[in-house]
Structures are given as structure tokens and as C-alpha cells.
Amino acid sequence: MEFAYNTEQLGENGTFGRKSHKEILLVQYFQNALRTLNPWITDTQVDEAQKKFEHHMSISSLMQINEEKYSMIREGIPVTVKKANGQMEEKKAMVIDFEHPFDEERNHFLAIKELKIHGDLYRRRTDIVGFVNGIPLLFVELKKNTV
């Protein structure tokens, strides 16, 4: 488990690669997973996948956003691929290897204690956030973190 409170260095080469406390997706781990799990993927497609994963419409409900992200995590993120004949098609880029869940070369697990997150309305210091390939999937709130 990594400790972030007052020790995290922000920036591309910082502790977790976050440029600001507003970023929750750990981009360096996310992009590494895309490249590892999808050997065919290009840098342009990695950027496209990240933008699609981070994007949500402000008119969407929290339930709709969660369903969309869940689908992308389970089934892959659609990216544009140019076929040999010049036509464009969509292909799914996987972000988690569910067939080999504990293979540390294919799935990177990270738990961070006291990570600061600044949203549009609130600023939080989380107790524990669990990441898989840079995606926050586990939030733990502790009543007394010494127990």
C-alpha cells in the first residue's frame, strides 16, 4: 500500500503520474495496460480510448455513467481501426485481463492511502482507494485507520 497524504508529488513523473488532484484515473498504469493487453493498439488509439473512458455527458445520470464505464471495463473500449482496404471499423481495446486476473504483468494492482481528490464541488482525502490498471475500483472509508 502506498501512502499519498503530503507525500505525493504531482506531475507526469510524479508519484502516481497525476498532474493535479482533479485526476482520478492513473494514466500511466491505464495506458500501460492498454498497450500490454492490446498489442495491435497505436498511440492514437490509446489516446482515443482514454478520452472515451474519461468522458461522460453532463446530462447522464450517475447510474448511466456507471453502466457505460462498467461496459467499457468488461467488454473493452471501442477505438477506431483502419482496415487494409482503407475502411474504418471499431475494435474493442481491453483494459483488464479477466482471463488471467492475478497475472501481475497483465494487471497492475495498487492501493493508495489518503489520496487527495478535488472535484468540482468537494475536496476529499480518501482513506483507501484500490486501483486496477490505473482505474479506481475500490473505495474504503475507515472509521479508525489505526485498527
Image (cartoon, helix red, strand yellow):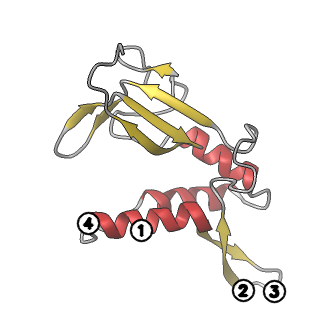
Distance Cα–Cα, label 1 vs label 3: 34 Å
Camera sees residue 124: yes
Task: Say which amino acid is labelled 4.
Answer: Ser
Task: Tell me if 138 is positioned left or right of 97 in this view.
Answer: left
Query: Where on the picture, by quarter, is residue 21?
Result: top left
Residue 127 locus on image (x, y percent): 34, 27
Looking at the rendered image, the disc whose residue lies closer to the viewer, 4 or 2, is: 4
Residue at 58% of width from left, 46% of height from top?
Answer: 30
Residues marked 3 and 2 touching at CB (< 8 Å): yes
Q: What secondary structure is found at the residue carrying circle 3? A: loop
Q: Is disc 2 surrounded by few (<14), some (14 to 19) or many (20+) residues within 10 Å? A: few
Residue 49 locus on image (x, y percent): 57, 61
Is 47 or 35 nearer to us in this picture?
35
Mark 3 or 4, nearer chain start: 4
Looking at the rendered image, the disc whose residue lies closer to the viewer, 3 or 4, is: 4
Distance Cα–Cα, label 1 vs label 4: 15 Å
Task: Tell me if 90 is positioned left or right of 73 in this view.
Answer: right
Looking at the rendered image, the disc whose residue lies closer to the viewer, 1 or 4, is: 1
Q: What secondary structure is found at the residue carrying circle 1? A: helix
Residue annotated with mark 2: 87
Residue 138, placed above or below residue 100: above
Task: Say which amino acid is labelled 3.
Answer: Asn
Distance Cα–Cα, label 3 vs label 4: 37 Å
Residue annotated with mark 1: 67
Mark 1 or 2, nearer chain start: 1
* Marking on residue 85: 3
Q: What secondary structure is found at the residue carrying circle 4? A: loop
Query: Where on the picture, by quarter, is residue 147?
Result: top left
Is 73 or 40 nearer to us in this picture?
73
Q: Residue furthest left?
A: 121
Distance Cα–Cα, label 4 vs label 2: 32 Å
Q: What secondary structure is found at the residue carrying circle 2? A: loop
